[in-house]
Image: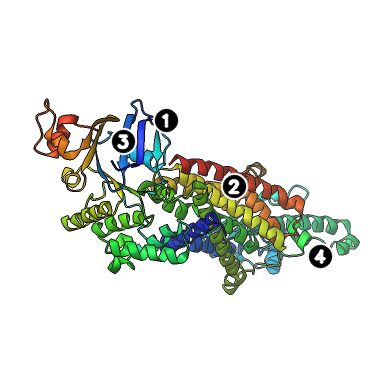
């Protein structure tokens, strides 16, 4: 081993020693992403699932005094459950007290001139906490039920033969929800789950937070003259950078192992879905390597060009949160409008998330992974070159 | 006359963001076993001269000659080590940067621990040591290089009289053993106690360079000085600096 390589390894070892004596840095790097994985795996459980979501507990107020409205609402409550209320105020109170999550108000003159039910005479009330997917299901279900009622009324008028053909009890299979599958499920045969989304997303977020310990040490070294002193021992700035790169890329590797353990064992132990881990090792290693290089490169760049730790922590922390918001880490991309989804594809964390999700969720191939890996590698090299200039500047 | 280990001729340096040059044609030389007191007000160019002698900056004019490839080490004014690491971990880290065989590195660490009387503090994190111990560690790290030339920049700032006396004794011993020393400070009594020669800088120029006693006696016009401080004030005047 050459003397330069030994210097790099000694500097890396020193970085680890300093990190182990910095409990705040360890909390940021390990506990924070693990906590986010746990929280988001449960918070997004229904949102990202393609499985059928439950209907919200629903209250009914039927203001139309007709027999058909009473029969229709009674049928619905009989099939899905629900609660009747005498007045709108009673329904509103129940929503406030969270006894029900949604309400259906059937307005007077519900039937049109031909005696068919009108959708615009039905109001759907939602509590402030009802999940969008549950609300969507209720809206669809009420819509289908109204259509069914219209058809049944028309069939009843047409005669007994049509009435038998369109009996609602025979139509449940035809008008139920179709099987829904995300592309990853089609590609990989696995279910899309919130934990499958959360582990790569918050792992990337945690990896980029190496900016905090890196800036803490590098700025202290520069301001105390320790970097200059190291230079008088014949150590070049490139060796200092390389030592930090080796140390923190190794640290990113340990973060990765911990987050995989959280997704694989801790989340299911608490009642969530387990992370699938039958990854293609080569693509997985490539994505982890370039993501880590980009994260450490950006951290070194910020640390090398800021004058004090407060400045670096504010800039680094703020930049990470902004990049994470843009990339679809904080708000998953399926929840973003198309314009924001396009923006999110132009950020380093977005490249990392794209590549990692392909590796974690589907069957990766070169066309999907390599472009993102190359973008991240280019970003890492540009950051490291600028960081090297900053360190040389002193 | 003892041959110079390190000599500089016509050194010039100006920082990019500053109008005034930091050094304007500075000449100096340093022989083995010589202690040179480097004096000057704040902003006079002392630190710039030290960084040029260390090779951290290249002179923009003039030249520096090193005779016999001397090892030049530096004791900065700041505590330039890792406060979260123990004294021994710091020494081991810095000695590992020299690329020495493990046995030789161990001997050097033991040597500087003994020389700077750090034995009882080796296992203590530097941030938990007193100012005096930290100053000794600061010097010990430089001594790991076994320097032929030692550049000390305000090495006794913020220490108690006992630690200061110890540090000055240590510098005297180094000089006796043949190490060439440049001692930059604002404490005149330290220079008077350690150095036989002084170099007085101001506005990047050498105002006085020579044997301390000769300079104190003065030439015919100066009429001599009672103290080094009087000599210093005579050359640099009383106007306050940045």
* Secondary structure of residue under mark 1: loop
Mark 4 or 2, closer to the camera: 2
Labels 4, 2: one chain: yes
**Subunit of label 4:** A
Q: Residues within 10 Å of mark 2 (few under 14, many from 20)?
A: many
Q: Secondary structure at mark 2?
A: helix
Q: Nearer the viewer, residue A101 or A39?
A: A39
Q: Earlier in the sequence, mark 3 or mark 1?
A: 3
Task: Tell me the quarter of the picture where residue B136 sits.
Answer: bottom left
User: Which type of secondary structure does the marked residue at label 4 adopt?
Assistant: loop
* Tag 4 and tag 3, C-beta contact below 8 Å: no
Q: Which residue is mark 4?
A: A173
Label placed on residue A380: 2
* Left or right of B140, for residue A227: right
Q: Is residue B207 left or right of residue A95?
A: left
Q: Give the percent coordinates (x, y) of residue A56.
A: 62, 63
State the CA–CA distance, disc 4 to disc 3: 99 Å
Label 4 vs label 2: CA separation? 54 Å
Q: What residue appears at the point 22 percent right and 36 percent down from the top-left corner? A: B210
Labels 3 and 1 share a subunit: yes
User: At x 35% / y 38%, what residue is drawn?
Assistant: B7
A353 lies left or right of A90: right
Q: Give the mark toward the camera: 3 or 1.
A: 3
Say few, some or many: other residues with alpha carbon within 10 Å of mark 3 (under 14 / 14 to 19 / 20 or more): some
Location of residue A285 (image quadrant): bottom right
Where is residue A320 drawn, in percent x and y?
A: 52, 49
Residues flagged by tags 4 and 3 on a common chain: no
Q: Which residue is mark 3?
A: B28
- Quick check: A170 above or below A209? below
Query: Foreground mark, 1 or 2?
Result: 1
Which residue is label 1 attached to?
Answer: B60
Q: Position of residue A149 (x, y in %)?
A: 77, 58
């Amino acid at each position: 081993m050459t003397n330069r390589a030994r210097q790099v390894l000694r500097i890396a070892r020193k970085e680890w020693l300093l990190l182990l004596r910095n409990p705040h840095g360890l909390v940021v790097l390990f506990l924070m992403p693990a906590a986010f994985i746990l929280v988001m795996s449960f918070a997004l459980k229904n949102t990202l699932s393609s499985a059928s979501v439950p209907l919200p507990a629903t209250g009914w107020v039927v203001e139309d005094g007709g027999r058909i409205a009473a029969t229709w609402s009674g049928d619905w409550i009989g099939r899905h459950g629900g609660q009747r209320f005498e007045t709108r105020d009673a329904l509103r109170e129940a929503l406030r007290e969270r006894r029900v999550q949604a309400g259906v108000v059937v307005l007077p003159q519900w039937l049109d001139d031909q005696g068919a039910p009108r959708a615009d005479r039905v109001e759907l009330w939602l509590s402030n906490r009802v999940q969008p997917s549950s609300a969507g299901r209720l809206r669809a279900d009420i819509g289908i039920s109204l259509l069914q009622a219209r058809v049944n009324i028309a069939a009843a008028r047409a005669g007994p033969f049509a009435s038998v053909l369109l009996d609602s009890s025979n139509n449940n299979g035809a008008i139920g929800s179709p099987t829904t599958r995300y592309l990853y499920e089609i590609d990989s045969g696995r279910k899309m789950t919130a934990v499958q989304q959360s582990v790569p997303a918050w792992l990337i977020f945690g990896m980029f937070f190496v900016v905090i310990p890196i800036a803490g040490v590098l700025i202290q070294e520069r301001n105390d003259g320790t970097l200059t002193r190291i230079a008088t021992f014949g150590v070049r700035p490139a060796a200092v950078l390389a030592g930090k790169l080796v140390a923190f890329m190794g640290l990113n590797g340990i973060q990765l192992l911990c987050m995989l353990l959280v997704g694989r064992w801790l989340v299911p132990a608490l009642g969530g879905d387990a992370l699938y881990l039958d990854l293609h090792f080569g693509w997985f290693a490539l994505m982890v390597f370039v993501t880590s290089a980009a994260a450490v490169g950006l951290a070194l760049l910020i640390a090398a060009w800021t004058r004090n730790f407060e400045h670096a922590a504010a800039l680094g922390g703020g930049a990470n949160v902004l990049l994470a918001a843009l990339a679809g880490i904080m708000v998953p991309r399926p929840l973003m409008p198309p314009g924001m989804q396009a923006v999110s594809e132009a950020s380093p964390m977005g490249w990392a998330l794209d590549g990692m999700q392909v590796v974690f969720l589907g069957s990766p191939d070169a066309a999907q992974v390599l472009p993102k890996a190359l973008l991240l590698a280019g970003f890492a090299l540009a950051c490291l070159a600028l960081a090297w200039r900053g360190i040389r500047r002193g | 006359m003892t041959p110079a280990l390190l000599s500089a001729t016509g050194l010039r340096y100006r920082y990019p963001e500053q109008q005034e040059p930091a050094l304007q044609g500075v000449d100096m030389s340093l022989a083995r076993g010589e202690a040179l007191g480097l004096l000057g007000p704040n902003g006079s160019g002392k630190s710039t001269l030290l960084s040029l002698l260390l090779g951290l900056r290249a002179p923009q004019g003039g030249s520096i000659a090193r005779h016999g490839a001397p090892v030049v080490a530096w004791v900065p004014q700041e505590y330039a080590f890792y406060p979260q690491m123990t004294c021994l971990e710091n020494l081991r880290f810095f000695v590992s940067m020299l690329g020495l065989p493990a046995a030789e590195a161990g001997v050097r660490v033991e040597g500087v621990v003994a020389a700077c009387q750090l034995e009882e503090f080796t296992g203590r994190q530097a941030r938990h040591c007193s100012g005096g111990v930290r100053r000794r560690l600061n010097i010990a790290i430089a001594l790991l290089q076994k320097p032929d030339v030692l550049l000390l920049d305000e090495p006794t700032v913020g220490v108690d009289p006992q630690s200061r006396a110890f540090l000055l004794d240590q510098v005297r011993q180094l000089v006796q053993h043949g190490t060439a020393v440049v001692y930059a400070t604002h404490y005149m009594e330290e220079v008077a106690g350690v150095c036989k020669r002084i170099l007085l800088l101001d506005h990047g120029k050498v105002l006085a360079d020579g044997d301390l006693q000769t300079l104190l006696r003065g030439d015919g016009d100066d009429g001599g000085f009672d103290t080094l401080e009087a000599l210093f004030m005579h050359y640099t005047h009383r106007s306050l600096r940045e």
